[in-house]
Image: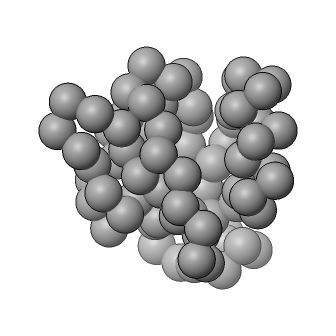
Amino acid sequence: MTTLDQVKRGQLFRIQQIPDELVRAQAIRLGIAEGSIVTCHEIIPGGPIVIGKNRQEIAIGRRLAREIRIELTTTSDDRAIE
């Protein structure tokens, strides 16, 4: 199982599961949901991981990032082969 805290800057990945309901609701408001393909924009040393889709960016703390399951992908197409 790969989690968000394991990504590297520039990697594309599909969000598999966001366990926290509040975080899931906030992400959906920004257009990022389970199943979305997003990019790791930045990893702040000792701080959050910044992910983005289109022009939206979200900074996610390391503790929460360890709980978000992801799947690495090589395409930005939301219909990527699983």
In the drawing, does residue 62 fall left or right of residue 73? left
Front-most of residues 29 and 16: 29
Residue at 37 percent across and 44 percent down: it is 49
Give the residue drawn at x 60%, y 68%: 56
The picture places residue 33, in percent across and down from the top left corner, at: 76, 51
The foreground one among 75 and 51 is 51
Note whether 57 is above or below 55 in the view shown.
Answer: above
Q: Is residue 24 visible?
A: yes
Query: How many labels were placed on the picture?
Result: 0
Query: In this image, 24 relative to 5: left or right?
Result: right
Question: 78 or 10, which is in the foreground?
Answer: 10
Say if residue 72 shows up in the picture.
no
**42 relative to 5, above or below:** below
Residue 57 location (% of width, % of height): 53, 61
Horizontal and vertical percent for residue 14?
60, 56
Residue at 72%, 73% in the rendered image: 78
Q: Quadrant of the C terminus?
A: bottom right
